[in-house]
Image (cartoon, helix red, strand yellow):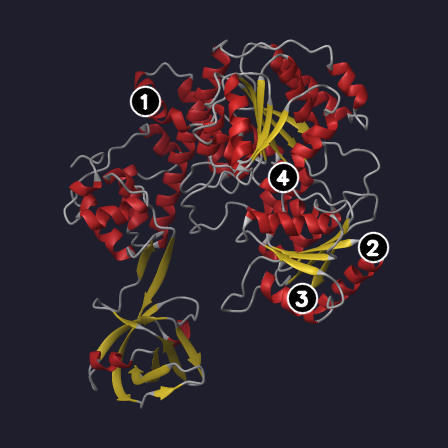
Amino acid sequence: MDIYSEIKNLKGVGPKLEEKLNKCGVFTLLDLLLYFPRDYEFVDGNPEISDISEELKQIISCKVVSFDRDIRTKNGKKLTSINLKYSDTKVMAKWFNQPYIKNNFKIGESYNLMGKYKKVASHLEVINPTIVFRDASDNEILPVYPLKGDITSSVISKLVNSILCSIVVSENLPQYLLEKYNLISLDEAIRNIHFPSTKEKLKDAITRLKFQELFTYSVKLMMLKNHLKKGNCGIKFTMSPELGDLKKALPYELTSAQSRVVREILLDQKSSIPMNRLVQGDVGSGKTVVAFISIFNVYKNGYQAAMMAPTEILASQHYAEAKKLLEGFDIDIELLTGSTPNKEKIRIKEKISSGLPIVVIGTHAIIQEDVNFTNLGLVVTDEQHRFGVEQRSKLINKGKEPDVLVMTATPIPRTLALYLYSDLDVSIIDELPPGRKKIETLFFQENSRQQVYNLALGEIEKGRQVYIVCPLIEEDEDGKLNSVDKIYNELAEGAFKNYNIEKLHGKMAPKDKEYIINRFKEGHLEAIISTTVIEVGVNVPNASVMIIENCERFGLSQLHQLRGRVGRGQYQSYCLLVGNAKNNVTKKRMMIMTESNDGFYIAEQDLKLRGSGEMFGLRQSGDSGLILSDIIEDINILKCASEEAKRILNSSDTKNIKLISEISKNLSRSSKYICFN
């Protein structure tokens, strides 16, 4: 069986099923083998009553005793109940709106029922259990696949099993690596990631496949860096004499960290090797002005520059800032976003295709097929983790080896940067402009929420404004998390009823979001209740309070990013964390946030606390293009894989050369979509 053949060639896959699989990104047999479960259900068989867990599914062999009469619940649902026995324990099984379920049962017969069993007084209760036709004494691990449309996990399992019954997956790592790191074979790993018989075998499969993935990832990054460094195919810019004038015209003096990073970028621009640099800087450290100085020099050399931001709000903000900062230097700056009027779009695209110097600031609109840069010298992507690899590469591939500058305010731990960005030169702005006040960060348990609102209202009375961030847009079924809708309704009728407040979230139309943000910026709103959509690109100097609901649900780096939305003006600002700190890890995380404003320190601590991550929390997609691995959580595997990749790349062993050759072929096939950052 050829694993590279199309999925339609697999027995049992007709045109309709092929279409459903294609929607899941499965086009070949190999795609299906690599379509890993996103999670697993751990099912115990016939456990002791004392061992029954309400959190996990169990299969229990129960005997039917009697049927209860169907009743109608208060909310109009029809409830069907059957009384059963498990050993000497009474079991009450309940189904909602399934009166026909009784037809599947006979009094006195035994059935294997799978579901989550709850202990209620002296008996067990289970809601909507299913009959399973297998031995209830066996423990099972059931794969749960990421699904689209009406395809089911059982269909995918069946197809994967039919492939694995016909092939043996070839090993492609050297035997000494398997022995050195105690890794199972690739064939065994693929089988156990789909159909693990024990948790230990699943753990071994995940470890092997993560190593495989991060090894290939490391090899590709190193090969790309070597490719860039060897070629003198970039643009050699000269230093514009107007750079000195620009520096004098800036409304503030650059920090020593900003000046250092500007020098590093200008040295890159003087080289014929294409620049490929990451600028890391904490929130408010002044990355944007560094980018504008880089853009200025490229423009003055007669080239075009493109700056891509993840949101229209941020793109518009950059555009306004660029116009203000570069005023008087005769620089043509245009804004191109999805909401730019068609007439304007046509005009801007014509200017771009003319090849004349231009600075284009925009969103993904600047990577559309009909945007033709003919003289692109510099590509800047802001908040690079917000763009998929393909999006970034589309912009870079519009030029002939343009310089690339990547900016992020997400602090990457120093211990990780070497491995994570091995294809990039990294510059760090580790200094904040003078005069910025420390944001006072306080943690409150949920039952102290009124105290939080009182502090916020006190700031509003002084003329300040407030952000309130929630993890959800709408209420969840459990009601455990606060949502934008819930908090908005509570505050509009309660503590904030005398003030103008609005909701903001990602499901809103761009125009509506922009309208609300502008009203907030102009001071017409005292508070915004929002999701993390305000994490990037909202700059309101008058906002002095950031309230984060269910703060324990956010990562430390994200909390730090959100905190950075305040403290942008002359006023003392506050970040008020509201949540449940029930365990020591959560308490430690909140302590880190309240004690430090240093994003790099916070990122380091986050890495230590997260450790190797949740063993069964599998990634099915991500900006890095990795399927299973998380480059932060799997730092230890990444270190080992990276070191082995470097050793093999520098090796003259014929077996290693063959392995690298195979990766090279794969790399060249996909290089169109590979971003060199």
| Residue under the point 48% across and 30% down | 367
Left or right, residue 61 beside residue 650: left
Residue 307 in the image, given as x and y percentages of width and height: 58, 29
First in sequence: mark 3 vs mark 4: 4
| Residue under the point 69% across and 60% down | 501
Give me the C-alpha separation between circle 1 and circle 3. 55 Å
Residue 411 in the image, given as x and y percentages of width and height: 63, 37
Residue 309's place in the image compared with 597, above or below, is above
| Residue under the point 20% across and 84% down | 106
**Secondary element at tag 3:** helix
From the viewer's side, name the closer residue of 88 and 519: 519
Q: Residue 364 carries which label?
A: none
Q: Are marks 1 and 2 in contact (CB under 8 Å)?
A: no
From the viewer's side, name the closer residue of 447 and 275: 275
From the viewer's side, name the closer residue of 414 and 450: 450
Give me the C-alpha separation between circle 1 and circle 4. 39 Å
Residue 449's place in the image compared with 161, above or below, is below
Q: Mark 2 points at which residue?
A: 463
Give me the C-alpha separation between circle 1 and circle 2. 62 Å
Q: Is residue 411 visible?
A: no
First in sequence: mark 1 vs mark 4: 4
Q: Which amino acid does label 2 sit on?
A: Gly
| Residue under the point 24% across and 54% down | 155
Give me the C-alpha separation between circle 4 and circle 2. 25 Å
**Secondary element at tag 4:** helix
Residue 464 in the image, given as x and y percentages of width and height: 80, 53
Left or right, residue 613 beside residue 541: left
Q: Are marks 4 and 2 in contact (CB under 8 Å)?
A: no
Q: Name the residue under label 1.
A: 665
